[in-house]
Every structure is written in structure tokens, then in C-alpha cells.
Amino acid sequence: MKRSIAVLLDEAKGKMSGYVALTNYRFMNLCVDAEPAALLCVTIELGGTEFKIEELVDVASPREDQFALLPKENDPELLFAICKGVEMSHPEFKMEVKDLDDEEGGPEEEREKYILLTMPEVDDDRHDLIISGVDTLTKACEGKLDFLLEDYTQKMTLKLTGAKEEEIKEATDAIKDMHDKHKEMLDGYIENKKQQVEEAYQRWQEKQQEGDDQKHEAEDKAAHDPEKAMKMNLDDLEGNVF
């Protein structure tokens, strides 16, 4: 294979890999589980300077759907700046400021704090929102992969003007194989993300069902209790006399 063709293939591979990796990163920012990559977009402004979150915070994950952010210094101004930075990047996170040691005494302002972030539950609306987001990002990435395939096929064909048919076929087969492999990689990321969403959605549905079952059980109990069954709040009848 000619060196000029190898250079074009390396160039195309870099671009395809970049688009697929960026799409997967964006999938991770459609947060379901607490994936550390979702915090990479968070910047913290302190004293007129912007910092990456890892420069000022240690991150733990006490639960699969939670981040615990531990400021590297016990400073109220830093704590506020971290909260502000997270809020700007991920307003959907539930945010709580907690004492690191529940039994720690002393003045409130001197207690060491951390920030607990909890991912929102995947209810009906969030399920549809995330799936729609995944589909939109997928379509955009597939479009870029298809464009690169067409673009680099043309570039290599021009480079191989006058070359043997076998050489042209070898080059075009190589770029097509590269495109297909990146498409398979993208499909794997899509499958993983959608499975993550569906599992979280199922957990939410089960939780709702448990609540409904408990409610029906309580209603059934009340219906079989003569005193509760006969008891009526007259206030509820006000304005409904007929």
C-alpha cells in the first residue's frame, strides 16, 4: 500500500475514533449512573480563576447513582464555588451539602463538609428524554462516519488515479472496513446506554408498583375496619350537598 494511502487511512481513523468517543462521552452526560466522565465538563471558578473539578475535589461514589465530592480544603467559599459549578453543568442532579462526620462538634462553619450528588430517577419523562437524546446523538455520529467514508474513498481514488484495480480495491475496502468497525463500536455504546436506561426505568416502575401495592393494602384494610369504613369527614361534604 502506498504511503500516501496509509496516511489518509490513519487520518480517517483518527477522525472516526474521535467522533465515536465524543458521542459516548455525551451519552455518559445523559446521566443515569454516576459515571466519573460526566464530571469532566464541570469547571469551578474561584478567585477569578477557572479550575477543573479534579484540581479542587476528590470524588467518591457511595452508590451507583451518587457522587460524593470532597473539597480538598475546608473552605466555605470553595464549597459554594463547587456547588455553583456543578449546578451550571448538571442542573438535574439533586445536591445536598452534608457534614463529613455526623458526630463532629464545633461551630457550623468549621465542620468539614462534602457535597452529595444523586442522579435523578428515570421516570416516564426522563426515560423518553434520554432515549430521544441517545437517538439524536446516534444519528449525528452515523452521519459523520458516513461522510468520512465517502470523503476518504474519493480522496484515495484520486490519489490512485492510474493505479491497478487491485490497489484501488485494497484501499477502498480498507476504509469501508474501518467505517464498519467504528459503526460496530458505536452500536455497542448505544446498546450499553439504552440497557442502563431501561434497567433504571424498571427500578423506578417497581418502586411505583410497591407504593401502589402498599396504598391498596391500606385501603383494603380500612374497608374491612367497620369504624374506619363508617367514618366520614363532614368537611369533605361542604359545598357538595344535593
Image: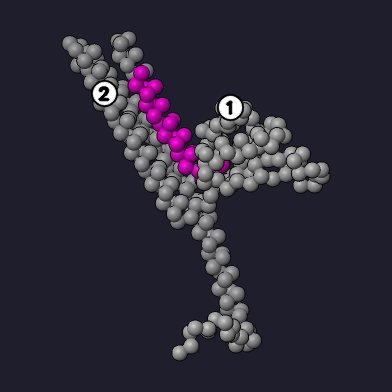
Q: Is residue 114 magenta?
A: no
- Indicate the position of residue 70 as horizontal and vertical percent values: 67, 36
| Residue found 58% across the figure and 38% down from its top | 84
Task: Report x, y in % for residue 139.
Answer: 33, 39
What residue is drawn where x is 34% and y is 36%?
Answer: 140
CB under 8 Å between discs 1 and 2: no
In the drawing, what numbered circle is on residue 48?
A: 1
The N terminus lies in quadrant = top left
Q: Camera-side residue: 240 or 183?
A: 240
Residue 226, how many percent across, how many down?
63, 87
Tag of residue 151: 2
Residue pictured at 56% horizontal, 36% vertical: 85
- Which of the pair 242/131 is nearer the observer? 242
Q: What residue span does the magenta drawing correspond to?
A: 11-35
Which element carries disc 1, helix, strand or loop?
Answer: loop
- Quarter location, residue 214: bottom right
Most prominent secondary structure in the magenta stretch? helix
Q: The C terminus appears in which quarter of the rendering? A: bottom left
Residue, far bottom: 242
Q: Is residue 187 above or below residue 195?
A: above
Can residue 66 be seen?
no
| Residue in view at x 24 percent, y 13 percent | 159
Q: Taking 9 as reference, is 230 left or right?
A: right
Q: Which mark is residue 26?
A: none
Is residue 106 among the parts visible in the rendering? Answer: yes
Q: Classify mark 1: residues with Cα within 10 Å, few (<14), some (14-19) or many (20+).
A: few
Colouring used for the render = one colour
The local secondary structure at tag 2 comes to helix
